[in-house]
Image (cartoon, rainbow, N blue to C red):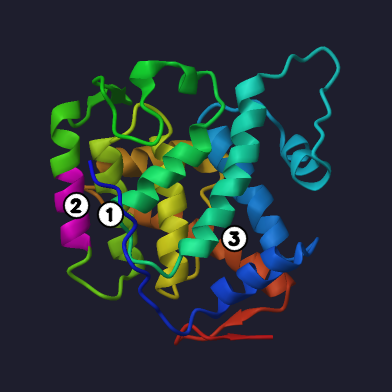
């Protein structure tokens, strides 16, 4: 499949994104970029079964070392995927203003899974769509031979609008997870997409907390019938991210502008 990178599309007035990118370029410690890296990585990986604690995630980010708690054995993939997630977020910020496309989505997966045990398996297909059938929560997902077509339709429909609301972003996420296009890593890729699209569309982003993963899973499962479950979970997570913005004295105006 042709994965030629599409041209960038400039979107103006994305001040939170600008702040995150500026702090990333400065390698600034202790700012909103720093806390976002740790919180997003820890919670998203933990939802998918990582055993690393938040402190261990922070040590990896801040010192490139990891402290193994006495008597506990660490999974190498948990460490590799933590480091990879940090790089994924950097790539997210660099491409946040671009229209969402298959190249970006596949790059998230490639970066996230590179160097893992799974990446050594030919059938795993890192950075490309799945070759084998998979299920999520006991629910059948799109068959491998139909994934490319369904992803094309999903993205085409999504791009019918130039500006997206939080409802649009969450609906896309649910449809993406229903397709489950990759062999593994779909949840983390999907949550990175949501964060990217929030930044692009001047929607306050959010991080699904590991403590609320059962509400999140229920929301995904029941979205078509009762969208309020997932919406409430995401809005609650959005309120939590607002607390970080308040701590750093960053205020979001209704039109999306930020004031210090």
> Which of the two discs, 3 and 1, sits closer to the camera?
1
Foreground: 14 or 39? 14
Identify residue for label 3.
240
Using the rendered view, name the quadrant where residue 166 is placed. bottom left
Q: State the CA–CA distance, disc 3 to disc 2.
A: 29 Å
Badge 3 or badge 1: first in the primary sequence: 1
Left or right of 178: which side holds 213?
A: right
Tell me if residue 142 comes above or below residue 244 in the rendering: above
Q: Is residue 235 left or right of residue 159?
A: right
Mark number displayed over residue 248: none
Q: Front-most of 160 and 241?
A: 160
Q: Nearer the viewer, residue 109 or 210?
A: 109
Q: Which residue is mark 2?
A: 154
Residue 25: % across, % down: 69, 66
Part of the protein shown in magenta: 150-158
Sooner in the amino-acid sequence: mark 3 or mark 2: 2
Residue 215 is one of the magenta-drawn residues: no
- In space, the residues marked 2 and 1 are separated at their CA atoms by 8 Å
Residue 158, position as x, y percentages in the image = 22, 61
Instruction: Decide: is 229 above or below 179.
Output: below
**Could you tell me if residue 143 is visible in this image?**
no
How crowded is the residue under tag 1: few (<14 C-alpha within 10 Å), some, or many (20+)?
A: some
Q: Which residue is mark 1?
A: 172
| SS for dot 3 | helix
């Amino acid at each position: 499949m042709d994965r030629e990178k599409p041209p960038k599309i400039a979107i103006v007035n994305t001040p939170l994104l600008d702040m995150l990118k500026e702090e990333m370029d400065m390698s600034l410690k202790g700012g909103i970029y720093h806390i976002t890296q740790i919180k997003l990585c820890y919670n998203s990986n933990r939802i998918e079964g990582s055993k690393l604690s938040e402190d261990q995630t922070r040590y990896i980010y801040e010192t490139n070392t990891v402290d193994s708690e006495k008597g506990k054995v660490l999974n190498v993939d948990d460490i590799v995927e933590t480091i990879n997630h940090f790089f994924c977020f950097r790539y997210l910020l660099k491409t946040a203003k671009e229209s969402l496309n298959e190249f970006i989505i596949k790059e998230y997966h490639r970066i996230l899974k590179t160097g893992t045990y799974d990446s050594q398996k030919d059938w795993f297909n890192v950075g490309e769509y799945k070759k084998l059938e998979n299920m999520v929560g006991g629910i059948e997902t799109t068959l491998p031979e139909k994934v490319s077509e369904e992803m094309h339709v999903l993205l085409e429909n999504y791009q019918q609008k130039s500006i997206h609301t939080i409802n649009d972003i969450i609906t896309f996420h649910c449809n993406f997870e229903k397709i489950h296009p990759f062999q593994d890593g779909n949840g983390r890729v999907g949550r990175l997409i949501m964060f990217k699209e929030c930044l692009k569309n001047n929607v306050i982003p959010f991080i699904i907390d590991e403590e609320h993963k059962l509400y999140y899973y229920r929301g995904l499962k029941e979205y078509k019938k009762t969208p309020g479950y997932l919406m409430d979970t995401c809005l609650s997570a959005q309120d939590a991210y607002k607390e970080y913005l308040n701590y750093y004295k960053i205020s979001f105006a209704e039109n999306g502008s930020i004031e210090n």
